[in-house]
Image (cartoon, helix red, strand yellow):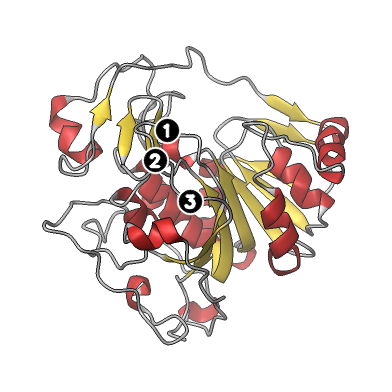
Amino acid sequence: YARLISINGSIDPPCNSNRSIYICAGYCPWTNTENDELVSCAFLARIVNSDFARYNIYCTPDVDQCPTYNAWLKDSLPQTHQHINKVPDHLLANFTLDYTIPIDYTMQDFRQADTLPMNWTVEVIEQFRKQVRTRKAFGTYNNKDIYPVLDKYASLAITDKKCAVVGTENPWIEAALLEYNASSVTTIEYATIYSNVPRLVTVTPMQFARKQQNERKERQLFDSVWSYSSLEHDGLGRYRDPLNAYGDFQTMVKISCILKPGGFLFLGVPLNVQDFTQFNLHRLYGPIRLRFLYRNFHVIEVLGSGLAKGRGDWTAQSFVALQNKIGCKST
């Protein structure tokens, strides 16, 4: 229902497509509202990005074809223990979204061993916080992409709010959120991470899902969720993760489960005018895949330039501000 709710009096038009594309994103096994009732949500007005408008990103996609698949089950699929050089023939239609997205195999990488447990200390976090205070370039790609988000959305989504970070190995986003006075930050990451940092909790997806499903009274919902340069790898096996053509879509469903109705998602993935999969490195998101990625969310704005233009160019990873439509009534 969420893809069809009215936001500030309007519904995005259907996506223009000559064919139906099979997508298996699944559903959330629990609700994000009390008493399982829809609630009123306040959605921010959209700030239109010219690239998103030109390439018809602001549209309503077809329904998902896996309405009975629990998206959290993706974490129980078998890990990739050996380097897979090529998508198996019987899965190629899934990975290319019914052959609409080009795939290339010329550059590859594979993590040969499981990630060792990490230890996040107060000292580690403080080094990142110092960079935030001085507005230095930092983070995954040593850039300043996060500062426009912090400046504009701190009061709405960070200060005195419960925040979560999905998919990270270096706590640069966590440090920025703590510096901007988040009440708590929860990192959900496959690797084992130990933290002695006040207000910073780490948990694996499997641990988190068990707690959410089994302890309704202690179920966590967040005011904002943050993910940068993570989803584009989900399901490609590069980091020994399960091979899953729809891993990124299923993670987006999982995020909608843990985010309050109308809550904010700040998402950074490679944006390009042409969808592309560089197997097994990453996906590039364009007019085809983006509309499905954003299915359950209201797109507020792109906090950056927009879509890269060169074939295979993955460098445009500006944060996009979104709001969760799951759990909301039409507004």
Mark 1 nearby-residue class (10 Å; few <14, some 14–19, many ≥20): some
Q: Secondary structure at mark 1?
A: loop
The residue tagged 2 is 309
Front residue of 226/143: it is 143
Task: Tally the numbered discs.
Answer: 3
Task: Give whichever of 326, 277 is nearer the camera.
Answer: 277
| Cβ atoms at labels 1 and 2 below 8 Å apart | yes
| Quarter of the picture holding the N terminus | bottom left
Which amino acid, by three-letter code, is at mark 2?
Lys
Residue 103 locus on image (x, y percent): 25, 30
> Which residue sits at x=35%, y=47%?
286
User: Counting other residues with Cα less than 10 Å from the Cα at mark 3, is it few (<14), some (14-19), or many (20 or more)?
Assistant: many
Residue named by callout 1: 313
Give the x, y percent position of residue 208. Answer: 56, 48
Q: Is residue 191 above or below residue 296?
A: above
Q: CA distance from mark 3 to mark 2?
A: 9 Å
Q: Secondary structure at mark 2?
A: loop
Label 3 vs 1, first from the N-terminus: 3
Q: Which residue shows up at 72% across the image and 38% down it?
A: 172
Q: Which residue is mark 3?
A: 306
Q: Position of residue 191 (x, y in %)?
A: 58, 30
* Horizontal side of residue 33 vs 78, given as left or right: right
Q: Where 254 falls versus 299 (above or below)?
A: above
Kind of residue at badge 3: Gly
Occupied quadrant, residue 181: bottom right
| Residue type (three-letter) at the residue carrying disc 1 | Asp
Q: Kindly tell me whether residue 121 is visible in this rendering.
A: yes
